[in-house]
Each structure stands twice: as structure tokens, then as C-alpha cells.
Image (tube, rainbow, N blue to C red):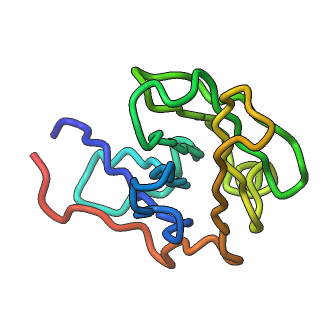
Amino acid sequence: MKPSVLSVIILSALPGFALPRANGQADYYAIKEATFSQTSAQAPTSTDDWTFFTRLFPATDGQYPAATLTLPNSAVLSMVDDSGAFDYLQTFSSQSALDSAFPEGTYTYTGIDGSANPPSGTLTMPAGGMYPDEIPYFTEID
């Protein structure tokens, strides 16, 4: 039986997921993800890693050359340009480390365009993290 990887993705921030791309608005989302390796027909018993990933899609290509994410504690993270979209990715060894670094609260996405009033939008990470009570798994794997 070869090992398979099952990722449980927790979309912890749906309010910002589907903003319209009009009038300078952008699409953006944030994901908290737990990754498990399943090597038998039994549920995995440990987590491989915990990941925070977020992406910002500008309303138009080249709208701004850089973007930041401001966390609820006012820390500002530079997002990485990925062919016109902007990403931020960080992996942790535990859920508590992930939730400590990216807690509930308001996250602000800002397109850095050199203006005095750059485009921005907010997203609220809900309390509780929206994690499942049980690890999903395949009952038949080869």
C-alpha cells in the first residue's frame, strides 16, 4: 500500500473570498490548512504540518507592483508577487503555533501603488478556526 496525502483545508476567511473585481476592488482569500499522510485504511493519527496561505488578485494586471497583509496585531507582512497575484505562505509544526501567528481578527490587504490612498480591503478570521472535529480519511486506498 503506497502512502497518500490527504489535505484538510479549512477556509477560515470566506468573507473576502469572492469580492467583485470592479471599481478597483480585488479578490483575496486566506486558508488555514492541516496536512496529514495516510498510509493505511485507518485515519491518520498525526498532522504533517499546518499552513497559512493567502492570495490577493489585483482588479487589473499590473495595478500595483507590491502588496502587504496587515495582521490583527498590526504586524505588516510583504506578500510575494506571483505573476501578478500576491501570495503569503508560512508553515508551522502545530495548530497552536499557526493560530498564534494568525489569530482571529481583521486582516487588511493593501496594494502598494505609491498613492496616498492605496487600494485595500479587509477580511475577518472568525473565532474558533472552523477546524473539523475528526480527521477525514479514505477507507480504501491502494
Residue 33, above or below 59 = below
Q: Does the image show residue 34?
A: no
Q: Position of residue 38 (x, y in %)?
A: 32, 49
Name which quarter of the figure residue 78 lies in: top right
Residue 89, above or below 24 = above
Q: Quadrant of the C terminus?
A: top left
Q: Position of residue 119 (x, y in %)?
A: 64, 46
Q: Quadrant of the N terminus?
A: top left
Identify which residue is drawn at 66% across, 29% down: 113
Name which quarter of the figure residue 88 lies in: top right
- Number of residue marks: 0
Identify which residue is drawn at 58% across, 21% down: 65
Name which quarter of the figure residue 134 lies in: bottom left
97 left or right of 109 in image: right
User: For this rendering, which residue is in front, 86 or 7?
Assistant: 86
Q: Does the image show residue 100?
A: yes
Identify which residue is drawn at 50% across, 42% down: 55
Identify which residue is drawn at 41% across, 55% down: 22
